[in-house]
Image: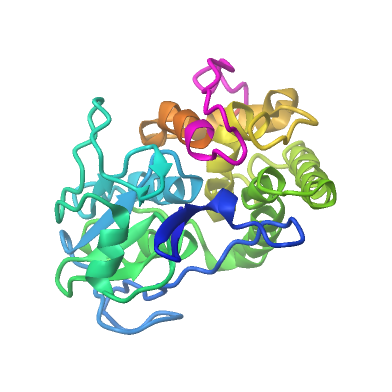
Amino acid sequence: MGRLIEGRWKSDDDLAAADGDFRRADAAFRSWVTTDGQAGPTGEAGFAAEPGRYHLYVSYACPWAHRTLIYRALKGLASIVDISVVHWFMGEDGWTFADDGQGLVGDRLSGHDFMHQVYTEAVPDVSTRVTVPVLWDRQRATLVSNESADIIRMFDSAFDGVGAAPGEYYPAAKREAIDAWNERIYDTLNNGVYKSGFATTQAAYEAAVHPLFDTLDAIEEQLSRTRFLTGDQPLEADWRLLPTLLRFDAVYHGHFKCNRLKLAEYPNLTGYARELYQWPGVADTCRFDHAMKHYYSSHAGVNPTRIVPVGPALTFDEPHGRDAA
């Protein structure tokens, strides 16, 4: 995540406000892929769902990109939407397509060296944060969306008529409950870990970290009553939450000072995270090595030594101990 500011690519730990608060900017590209190419809730029309037309740029380190990888797996879109993966390190040039020596193959679509070149290919004079995920349209040679919340809803429904796997994760009957959880979890937890970690005053940090743990406590209590956040099946609110939970003990507890408790100290949340991680196809979307190396190496303002910890040992492969509903 970075932005072109005064000629150099700055990362999120450079973007704290003067009062010490971290404020995330809105996504700049908000068009939608739809079944017939009509306009979605935002943006312009002309992006019809077609196999092979769209390309997804992601980072295995980034929880926002991880959402889209999870949905790509859940909906069986691997043969319909292909991907390129950026290197885990984000420095002065932002996300790059450098070879990590462990299987990354660069920009498989256009051969760019940097993620910002994908943005400027779409809009040469663009001035925006350069983030992943990015959904790219081969046919129109432009960027469709860089908003993860929108992309997962496109994946959930737009491709059903062109080969996507069955399954609906934002059903009408559950939308009010899903939206309520999404709103709270995004503000206090998904983004709350960043507000805690990138705060530059004690007051800003405490204003973020206490609501974060209030939300974890509320989810722990909810999971004592229901198998998933909104009932007996995992839906959008669950899949939006999971990437943050998977990174919590490995990154956010230490690196971002979210250390009142570990995820492992919440029994219901631990079993829940393990069950979702073990859902068919989900574990293959996870690269904990990328997450650890990215956060500890890229955020020099938070970790000036850039030393990457050797732990903790993660246990998501262990039995989740949750009986079928």
Question: Which of the two residues, 223 or 109, is positioned nearer the viewer here?
Answer: 109
Question: Which of the two residues, 228 or 116, is positioned nearer the viewer here?
Answer: 116
Res 216 quadrant in image: top right
Q: Is residue 320 left or right of residue 114?
A: right
Question: Which of the two residues, 217 or 205, is positioned nearer the viewer here?
Answer: 205
Model colouring: rainbow
262 over 310 or under it: above or below:
below
Q: Is residue 187 magenta?
A: no
Where's residue 298, x and y in %? 48, 38
Where's residue 219, x and y in %? 74, 43
Q: Is residue 184 left or right of residue 71?
A: right
- What is the span of residues highlighted in magenta in the rendered image? 296-322
Q: Residue at x 56, y 15 (%)?
A: 313
Where's residue 23, x and y in %? 64, 61
279 over 70 or under it: above or below:
above
74 over 121 or under it: above or below:
above
Please indicate, yes or no, whether residue 159 appears anywhere in the rendered image.
Answer: no
Q: Residue at x 56, y 34 (%)?
A: 247
Query: Magenta span: helix, strand or loop, mainly?
Result: loop
